[in-house]
Image (cartoon, helix red, strand yellow):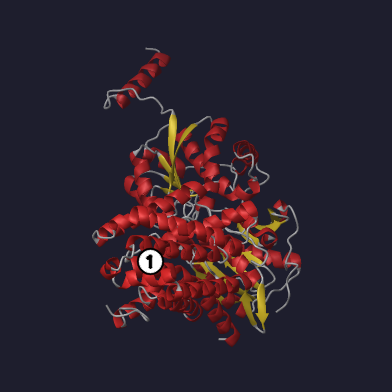
């Protein structure tokens, strides 16, 4: 097997994996704090992809510019969704939460079908088909830019939770719900803020993802599943784990495609999931319960 | 009694005896109900909708040509074999006399099982998996080449392309979707190619991929690394678009892309999505006969129903779907009945001349397996934004271009 072929494929897997990681980061943040599993995560990313396509068609807005208004809109949407719909379910049994979020996901998919139809949509920016040549290795420009953006947004999110007052307060709510209430934190408001942040995260991932794949309404459930695989491999609730899981899944899918058969890509990521569940059920960077 | 009186009495007695068990006098049914099953949503939605255009125009054209009333009962298979099966069941319950569909081989196989169990004729518009007409079914009929025929015709046309352009490509990579159709085509290529010693190339690598794949980076990297002269491709639409974009990203410019017979490359969406990148792709596939009288009739109806669409992009889907409904109507006219057995028998006796079919091929006649033989392929190349017939010479609208102008020997 030529080494440049392997290098090309690994690099592509890493870059795609970082965007996967950003998508899963949103899910991990929401679960880590609110303790609600967002089964509409992939669907939310699909909506962000459509929003990017619409902004590009209407205003020729590059996805790297469009991600600002799209992320802001998703923050507001996520905040409102948590405050108005999900918060009342926080103390209810998990199956009630599951049904609620699943219903939201189904509404999203069908809403997209009604609005855009079943056809695949994409956008064509100038650099879409271009690549950098590093000797024999070709780096897809759009994928590289998307991966750097994913890294930058993830770093910003880490810094926010580490240094910002609101970030610290959110961590306090996540660590000890009762204690946070005792010291006077408005826990439900911070939950809504967190859901907004997670939504903005997945919105940015959607803006990047549209550079890599075409969007259809049916894409959502597949990405919800992928996000789950990534956060379970990385460790549910662990932000670093989400990024690591994304890169691992991206690279393992690429390597499986190269060394076994391209048709086995998804099978391989599920194989990895089973291995992690068997030997490290808390995930690679997750803490034991 | 005179002879004329005797004959009248005999005829009256015969009719009375025939109707006696039923106690009623039966009139010929006025209308044939045709259940049309197509993937109008999901991953194959674009092609399913394209086929549906052929179904939608069929009743008006058939009334004009055959004087038969056809009522369409359309159902969406949602690009899913299980849905195809349940929708077929429902159409039969709702009174469909004949089923037509369903573009995808997997879906079609599911519908064929239902049709056979329920004893309702099923006329396949498009589906190439050979096994569908190898099951001994009595109610399943196909006016579309099997994957073997499609491959044989497609590979033979490759030889004609090389002869017409004085080129001798020595190697190819074969990429194909791994669904029922793609597997059948791959099997066909594997079986037929070694026997065609007039083809100068050998296959360096065979790469199967998921038709619903969102990213084909690895697949294209592998194909490029083999450094073939050209890419032989069996694809669907969305994957063909993704694949062509990935080839551009990886700066891979082989002599060309040639399909031995599959959808995708000649579709309107392929050209719309890719623009100049769509140019020069060749597909050796079933096509419509631009010179037949029926194409003129259907073409006029198509333009009336779809003023914004160009028939060239839909010709195969429209032609084969229209022909399937026309076969049903023709059988109904001869059978003078909607009784499933009578209809099936009439379909079996079909003999539609070349001028009365839209798709490219000989007269429509079913063999004992329910398969029409003699359907033809043409080499269709995207030239100046439209799929253009380049071979066989008698149907050609332009000369074939091979290798592509951007080709650089690796």
In the rendered image, the vertical position of residue A41 relative to residue B254, given as above or below: above
Q: Quadrant of the C terminus of chain A?
A: bottom left
Q: Chain of mark 1?
A: A
Q: Residue at x 53, y 29 (%)?
A: B67
Question: In this rendering, does residue B15 appear at all?
Answer: yes
Q: Residue at x 42, y 58 (%)?
A: A78
Q: Residue at x 74, y 69 (%)?
A: B406
The residue labelled by disc 1 is A30
Q: Residue B274 at x, y = what percent?
A: 65, 60
Q: Residue B375 at x, y = what percent?
A: 57, 53
In the rendered image, the vertical position of residue B34 relative to residue B19, given as above or below: below
Q: Residue A147 at x, y = what percent?
A: 55, 73
Label 1 Cα crowd, 10 Å radius (few <14 / some 14-19 / many 20+): many
Relative depth, front residue between A178 and B390? A178
Q: Quadrant of the N terminus of chain A?
A: bottom right
Relative depth, front residue between A132 and B159? A132
């Amino acid at each position: 097997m030529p080494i440049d072929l392997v290098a090309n494929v690994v690099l592509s897997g890493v870059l795609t994996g970082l965007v996967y990681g950003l998508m899963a980061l949103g899910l991990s943040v929401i679960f880590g704090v609110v303790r609600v599993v967002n089964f509409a995560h992939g669907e939310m990313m699909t909506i962000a992809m459509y929003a990017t396509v619409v902004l590009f068609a209407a205003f020729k807005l590059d996805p790297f510019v469009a991600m600002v208004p799209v992320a802001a809109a998703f923050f507001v949407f996520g905040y409102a969704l948590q405050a108005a719909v999900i918060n009342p379910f926080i103390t209810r049994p998990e199956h009630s939460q599951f049904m609620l979020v699943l219903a939201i996901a189904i509404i999203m998919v069908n809403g997209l079908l009604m609005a855009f139809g079943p056809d695949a949509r994409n956008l064509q920016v100038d650099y879409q088909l271009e690549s950098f040549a590093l000797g024999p290795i070709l780096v897809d420009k759009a994928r590289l830019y998307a991966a750097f953006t994913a890294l930058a947004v993830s770093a910003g999110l880490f810094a926010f939770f580490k240094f910002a007052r609101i970030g610290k307060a959110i961590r306090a709510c996540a660590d000890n719900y009762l204690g946070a209430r005792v010291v006077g934190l408005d826990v439900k408001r911070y939950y809504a803020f967190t859901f907004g942040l997670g939504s903005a995260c997945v919105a940015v991932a959607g803006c990047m993802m549209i550079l890599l794949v075409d969007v259809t309404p049916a894409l959502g459930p597949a990405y919800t599943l992928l996000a789950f695989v990534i956060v379970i491999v990385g460790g549910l609730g662990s932000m670093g784990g989400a990024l690591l899981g994304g890169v691992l899944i991206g690279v393992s899918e690429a390597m499986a495609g190269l060394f076994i058969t391209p048709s086995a890509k998804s099978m391989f990521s599920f194989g990895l999931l089973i291995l992690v569940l068997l030997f490290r059920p808390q995930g690679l960077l997750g803490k034991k319960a | 009694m005179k002879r004329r009186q005797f004959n009248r009495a005999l005829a009256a007695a015969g009719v009375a005896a025939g109707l006696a068990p039923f106690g009623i006098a039966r009139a010929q049914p006025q209308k044939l109900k045709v259940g049309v099953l197509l993937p109008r949503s999901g991953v194959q939605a674009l092609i399913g909708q394209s086929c549906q255009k052929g179904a939608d125009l069929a009743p008006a054209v058939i009334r004009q040509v055959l004087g038969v009333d056809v009522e369409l009962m359309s159902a969406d298979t949602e690009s899913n074999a299980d849905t195809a099966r349940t929708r077929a069941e429902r159409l039969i319950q709702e009174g469909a006399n004949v089923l037509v569909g369903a573009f995808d081989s997997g879906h079609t196989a599911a519908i064929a099982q239902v049709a056979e169990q329920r004893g309702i004729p099923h006329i396949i518009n498009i589906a190439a998996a050979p096994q569908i007409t190898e099951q001994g079914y009595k109610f399943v009929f196909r006016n579309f080449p099997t994957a073997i025929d499609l491959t044989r015709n497609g590979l033979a046309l490759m030889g004609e392309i090389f002869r017409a352009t004085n080129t001798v490509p020595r190697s190819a990579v074969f990429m194909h979707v791994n669904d029922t159709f793609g597997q059948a085509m791959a099997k066909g290529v594997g079986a037929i190619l070694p026997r065609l010693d007039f083809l100068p190339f050998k296959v360096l690598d065979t790469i199967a991929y998921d038709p619903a794949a969102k990213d084909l980076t690895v697949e294209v990297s592998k194909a490029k690394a083999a450094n073939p002269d050209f890419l032989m491709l069996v694809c669907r639409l969305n994957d063909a678009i993704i694949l062509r974009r990935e080839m551009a990203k990886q700066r891979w410019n082989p002599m060309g892309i040639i399909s031995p017979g599959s959808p995708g490359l000649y579709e309107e969406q392929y050209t719309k999505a890719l623009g100049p990148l769509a140019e020069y792709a060749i597909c050796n596939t079933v096509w419509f006969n631009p010179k037949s009288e029926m194409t003129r009739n259907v073409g006029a109806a198509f333009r009336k129903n779809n003023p914004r669409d160009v028939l060239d992009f839909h010709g195969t889907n429209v032609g084969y779907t229209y022909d399937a409904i026309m076969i049903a109507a023709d059988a109904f006219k001869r059978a003078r009945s909607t009784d499933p057995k009578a209809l099936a028998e009439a379909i079996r006796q079909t003999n539609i001349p070349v001028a009365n079919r839209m798709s490219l091929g000989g007269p429509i006649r079913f063999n004992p397996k329910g398969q029409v033989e003699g359907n033809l392929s043409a080499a269709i190349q995207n030239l100046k934004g439209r799929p253009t017939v380049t071979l066989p010479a008698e149907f050609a609208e332009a000369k074939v271009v091979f290798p592509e102008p951007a080709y650089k020997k690796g």
